[in-house]
Image: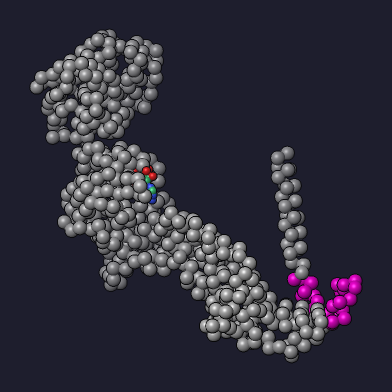
């Protein structure tokens, strides 16, 4: 049972404000992922929660209790570091035992706990190996084991999988999700990796330059990004954007004129937007369709064949590049002339200040 | 072609290395030889490389002065100064390495700069301080001065060794519930042990060989080995045989100790892969 609440947290280094007032509440058993570009303050925020960085202002509550001035070891948290940060001079058993020993747990109980965790993580053969004798994946498991064995209220992870190769990362991702389901502990997880964020999170927090851009479930962010930044950041390959002129709207949708003169009627509301306003249209590569002829035409410039899918980069007549994700077996070739179909229900509109127009109907998976 | 140049530079560097080593070692070697000569052989020209070795210089040295008394003082002063310097320097270097502030670099440079001051510049104040606190001619007094003069170098060295230890390992300790003290003693010190050992060794050598303060702050009671050597250099003119014997006796323990512990140190350094 553990909830975490951040109330207007701020962090200033010297004169520079790194975290600019973040408020967030994390439910018991929730898996929350912080994502954002490099340097946006993800690690700093996590370390503030951990107690490794001082909180300049604001409140941190764990289970409703203010933790700002509580020692890291007394907050009931465990952290897994990107570099694993195992104690190099202790073997695997001692690494896991260290925290328990400091907490004054009796020897027999310690042994039982460690053996149980080692069994869960398949670490039994390595209990008396030093970290230097283990592979990256094994060290990662030890780091996780060291966190689990303390039975913390909240797990903190700072890019735990980023030093592993792609195959192992995929495997550990699944294992971590399973482990979370089994232990049911509240988890805060920092990552760069889209796939990790989308697959593991109950809730994603998108950060940029020390502020929250959007908080929501993975599919909520995917289907209803709140602004241009989130729309660009979530999804791979990233969403296509091109300019348009707002013409007018009603309660069922808004119509915009594209550069080639064609119009698009998108099911989003547009309160307070004046006709003639320059807006941005966004559509994901997987939603654009290739058509043999029609409006929105262009020339194929690059083709990336990934086997199951193909990414077609089309240079439009107005000079914009639009990426289309299509079938792996598509026959289109470079330099051919193609037309694109833009299904309006999959289009997003963004006002000049970057905010998205509200969709008329929420996506059923992102209600 | 490239291989050949590489090989010939390597041979060149090796020869140069040996040359410098012999150049540095020669005086010690000559002192060692001279200590086994009679006084006449010791000052003969041209110098003799082959001669009938004699222990007469050693016998006389032992007869005239109490070698063990001086050695005892040196050991007490060196070990005491080194141990207290390390004890003070570890927390200082820890805070500088892991909690640096705007002024950390400046402080380190300033500390080192105190080593550049000629000691004679502070001879009178230190002498008066020692006299007024009744620490003249005591091992405690000399150890305190030795400790203070070496402290900057020791802090600096420990600082560089501590910087090698990745901060997340200490933070992991903190997350595991370690206090600052436990973090330092149970996580940092074991990891930095080879570095601390070589720092301590350097400090021991510096204290062992320190002559300026020992000659000025001690007379008989607390006189260390450097004073023992000095006592053979003046009164009735120079007697090179006895002087060499005394010097050999003075440097031998630290030389042997350094030789042994150096091997330990290299082993320690290669064993403990920190990262
Ligand atoms: N000790 C520090 N002193 C000054 N600035 C710092 C310090 N630590 C971090 N910063 C700054 O704070 C900002 C956020 O850093 P942080 O490490 O939290 O980013 P991040 O989102 O974790 O990035 P990454 O994805 O690269 O790990 C960066 O601009 C960084 O330069
Ligand atoms: Mg980071």
Farthest bottom residue in view? B63
Farthest left residue in view? A251
Residue B54 drawn at (x, y percent): 82, 83
Q: Would you identify the image quadrant in which residue A299 lies?
A: top left
Q: Would you identify the image quadrant in which residue B63 lies?
A: bottom right
The quadrant the N terminus of chain B occupies is: top right
Of residues B266 and B54, the one drawn nearer to the viewer in this rendering = B54
Q: Which residue range is magenta in the image?
A: B28-52
Question: Is residue B196 toward the left or the right of residue A44 in the image?
Answer: right
Residue A131 drawn at (x, y percent): 42, 58
Which residue is at a point 38% across and 23% down the rendered structure image? Answer: A304
Residue B268 in sight in this render: no
Which residue is at a point 18% across and 53% down the rendered structure image? Answer: A3
Which residue is at a point 31% across and 55% down the rendered structure image? Answer: A54
Position of B266 relative to B214 (above/below): above
Question: Is residue A221 toward the left or the right of residue B194 in the image?
Answer: left
Residue B135 drawn at (x, y percent): 55, 83
Of residues A67 and A174, the one drawn nearer to the viewer in this rendering = A67
Position of A259 relative to A232 (above/below): above
Question: Is residue B94 toward the left or the right of residue B115 in the image?
Answer: left
Of residues A202 and B73, the one drawn nearer to the viewer in this rendering = B73
Q: How is the image coloured?
A: one colour
Q: Is residue B31 magenta?
A: yes
Farthest right residue in view? B46
Question: Is residue B201 toward the left or the right of residue B238 in the image?
Answer: left
Q: Is residue A136 magenta?
A: no
Position of A342 relative to A217 (above/below): above
């Amino acid at each position: 049972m553990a909830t975490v609440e951040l109330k207007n947290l701020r962090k200033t280094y010297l004169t520079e404000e790194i975290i600019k007032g973040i408020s967030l509440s994390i439910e018991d058993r929730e898996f929350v992922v912080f994502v954002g570009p490099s340097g946006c303050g993800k690690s700093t925020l996590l370390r503030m929660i951990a107690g490794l960085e001082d909180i300049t202002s604001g409140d941190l509550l764990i289970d409703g209790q203010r933790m700002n001035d509580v020692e890291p070891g007394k907050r009931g948290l465990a952290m897994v570091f990107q570099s694993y940060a195992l104690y190099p001079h202790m073997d695997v058993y001692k690494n896991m035992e260290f925290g328990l020993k400091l907490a004054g747990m009796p020897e027999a109980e310690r042994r039982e706990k460690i053996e149980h965790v080692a069994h869960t993580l398949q670490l039994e053969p390595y209990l008396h190996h030093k970290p230097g004798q283990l592979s990256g994946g094994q060290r990662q498991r030890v780091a996780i084991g060291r966190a689990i064995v303390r039975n913390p209220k909240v797990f903190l992870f700072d890019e735990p999988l980023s030093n592993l190769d792609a195959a192992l990362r995929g495997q550990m991702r699944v294992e971590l999700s399973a482990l979370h389901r089994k232990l049911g502990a509240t988890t805060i997880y920092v990552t760069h990796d889209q796939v990790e964020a989308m697959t593991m999170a109950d809730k994603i927090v998108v950060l940029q330059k020390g502020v929250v851009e959007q908080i929501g479930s993975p599919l909520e962010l995917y289907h209803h990004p709140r602004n241009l930044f989130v729309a660009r950041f979530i999804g791979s390959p990233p969403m296509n954007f091109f300019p348009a002129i707002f013409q007018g709207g009603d309660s069922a949708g808004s119509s915009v004129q594209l550069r080639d003169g064609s119009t698009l009627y998108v099911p989003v509301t547009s309160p307070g937007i004046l006709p003639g306003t320059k807006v941005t249209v966004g559509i994901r590569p997987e939603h654009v369709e290739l058509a043999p002829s029609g409006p929105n035409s262009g020339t194929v410039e690059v083709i990336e064949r990934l086997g199951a899918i193909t990414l077609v980069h089309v240079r439009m007549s107005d000079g914009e590049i639009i990426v289309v994700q299509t079938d792996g077996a598509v026959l289109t070739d470079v330099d051919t002339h193609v037309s694109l179909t833009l299904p309006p229900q999959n289009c997003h509109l963004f006002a000049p200040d970057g905010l998205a127009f509200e969709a008329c109907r929420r996506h059923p998976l992102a209600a | 072609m490239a291989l050949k140049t590489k090989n010939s530079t390597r041979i060149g560097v090796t020869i140069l290395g040996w040359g410098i080593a012999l150049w540095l070692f020669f005086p010690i070697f000559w002192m060692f030889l001279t200590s086994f000569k009679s006084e006449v052989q010791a000052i003969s020209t041209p110098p003799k490389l082959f001669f009938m070795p004699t222990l007469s210089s050693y016998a006389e040295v032992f007869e005239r002065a109490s070698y063990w008394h001086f050695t005892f003082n040196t050991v007490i002063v060196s070990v005491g100064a080194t141990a207290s310097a390390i004890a003070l320097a570890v927390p200082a270097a820890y805070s500088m390495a892991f909690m640096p502030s705007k002024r950390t670099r400046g402080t380190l440079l300033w500390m080192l700069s105190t080593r550049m001051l000629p000691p004679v510049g502070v001879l009178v104040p230190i002498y008066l301080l020692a006299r007024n606190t009744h620490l003249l001619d005591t091992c405690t007094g000399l150890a305190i001065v030795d400790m203070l003069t070496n402290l900057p170098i020791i802090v600096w060295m420990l600082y560089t060794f501590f910087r090698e230890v990745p901060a997340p390992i200490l933070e992991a300790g903190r997350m595991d519930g370690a206090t600052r003290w436990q973090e330092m003693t149970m996580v940092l010190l074991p990891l930095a042990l080879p570095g601390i050992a070589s720092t301590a060794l350097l400090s021991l050598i510096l204290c062992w060989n320190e002559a300026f303060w020992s000659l000025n702050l001690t007379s008989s009671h607390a006189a260390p080995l450097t004073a023992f050597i000095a006592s053979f250099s003046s009164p009735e003119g120079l007697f090179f045989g006895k002087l060499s014997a005394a010097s050999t006796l003075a440097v031998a323990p630290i030389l042997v100790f350094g030789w042994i512990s150096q091997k330990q140190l290299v082993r320690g350094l290669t064993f403990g892969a920190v990262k």
